[in-house]
Image (spheres, coloured by chain):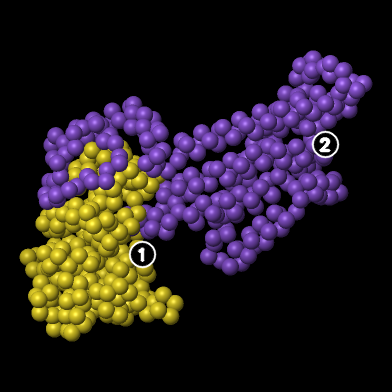
Amino acid sequence: MVIGQATISFKFIWDNMGLFLDGVKLTIFIAVIAFTLATLGGLAVALMRMSKSRLVRMFVATYINVFRAIPLLVFILFVYYGIAISFELQVSAIQAGILALTLQYSAWLGEIFRGGIQAVSHGQREAALSLGMGRPQAFMRVVLPQAFRIAIPPTGNMFIGMVKDSSLVYLIGVPELLRVSNRLANRTFRYFEVYLATVLIYLVLTTSIYFMVKYLERRYALIDVLTARARRFSVFGGRRAARLRSLQEKVKQPRAVAPLEMDMGDADVADHGESVAGGPDRPG
Amino acid sequence: MKAANPSAGSAPESVVRLRGIHKSFGSNHVLKGVDLRVERGEHVVVFGPSGSGKSTLLRTTNLLEQPDEGSVVFRGKEYGPGFKEEGLPRGRARELRQAVGMVFQQFNLFPHLSVLDNVTLGLRRVKGISREEAELRAAAQLERVGLLEKIGSFPALLSGGQQQRVAIARALVMDPAVMLFDEPTSALDPELVGEVLAAMRALAKTGMTMIVVTHEMGFAREVGDFNVFMDEGVIVEAGGREIFTDAKEPRTRDFIRAVL
């Protein structure tokens, strides 16, 4: 195929697949490390943002506002050339890039996590406390698991953003996917083929993450009527159901506790749920 | 108000005492010096107009609200700012809450956990009981409230009445010395109120010590051994079942006439 003066050929893309894969590996490495660190940083930011101390709150509020306000590319250049190189610090370009990404993403993730934590109703914490749990325990066992579920979709978007933003570190010389492509294109002058391949590789990466996030979202969704119907088999089937059934049998045989003698006419109304073990509905 | 003799085993013995409780939210003085003594096996009903401080009183009893003044005395320990001169040992809120069950108006079941896990959480994480043992005890309590077949279900799949019964099982499984009910039927559709009241009535028959804040006057008349009418942050009047037929205070009479 001939367009203008160039002959379009993709064969050499296959020949250079090893180069691309090295770039992809580094892109994934940077994104995963920076995102893991930013998740921890974000959690710290969220907790400090809800601290009792005004000073701590003001400190993190400033951190969030400053780091969200700087263009990421400018920040990456500043961290590497402005600080690491200027002050002759023993920091590689990869480390500087990861640091810059982590600092900025901690600010964003911090706000997402805070939103998730605050979306959990106050009554949840109170219910945990009134069982005799301590505050840290109530937070870890009751509030955080729910906040985590609420935060999955926006956090997933941030991870996709991280993979894309990691391409910016190519400007400080990190040989990740974009830099590898750039070098290959400049050497071969096959800009169309090379950048098309690069676009497709990023697309595959981000789309895979998208499906992973969708999976997590479904897997950890707070169960409501609709999700339960959609997932009837995974929730109510299999080994779990068998275990619960044996538990029910054990309890039914010898009455460990005297049953409350309840005199009620119409229990079990408005019952959308499935009986777990499929046993007959007990009369109230 | 009520005499108690702590040395004699058969005489009424107080489980919880509230002493001179004051509580404000900002400039809103919600509780203005409330004293209440609850004896073992007694069923105390607290009623009164909304904003009278009855829910706050209940929440102070398990220290979800920290009193500004006064104290809660439970099992020989004193909680809250209290009266320092008395020399009772101080307790920690966690200790008290482990032995006091609470049922909320909005159920507050943990939506990310199955019915069974809702009931085992406290046993496993607070009392450190093994999973197997905790599940047996939890299932037994769920059977008591008629929900054994729902152990694998999730809170959002249950009706309000079923959720509240799970909440009762979740509190009972901790083997509390006293159960607190904060308007347990107020959030329910009318046709679901009966099953929750039935569970509470049955629980009352087992001799459980209960403090119930409720608008269900029928339930109060039937179960309430000691009935407390609150208005504007104070106990206006308190007494046995006769309070519903011949209250002494005009405010009590007006309220009872209005709700019955």
Q: Quadrant of residue B74?
A: bottom left
State the residue position of label 1.
Answer: B64
* Residue A242 image offset from top left, x and y in percent: 28, 28
Which chain is tinted yellow?
B
* Residue B6 image offset from top left, x and y in percent: 14, 70
Tell me the kind of residue under disc 1. Leu
Q: Quadrant of residue A11?
A: top right
Residues indicated by labels 1 and 2 sit on the same polypeptide chain: no
Query: Residue B216 vs residue A123: left or right?
Result: left
For mark 2, does the 10 Å Cα neighbourhood hold few (<14), some (14 to 19), or many (20 or more) residues? Answer: few
* Residue A250 image offset from top left, x and y in percent: 19, 33
User: If the image is split into quadrants, where does the C terminus of chain A sit?
Assistant: top left
For mark 1, does the 10 Å Cα neighbourhood hold few (<14), some (14 to 19), or many (20 or more) residues? Answer: some
Tell me the kind of residue under disc 2. Gly
User: Is residue B195 at all visible to an observer of this figure?
Assistant: yes
Query: Residue A39 vs residue A132: left or right?
Result: right
Question: Disc 2 on helix, strand or loop?
Answer: loop
Mark-to-mark CA distance, 1 and 2? 56 Å
State the residue position of label 2.
Answer: A173
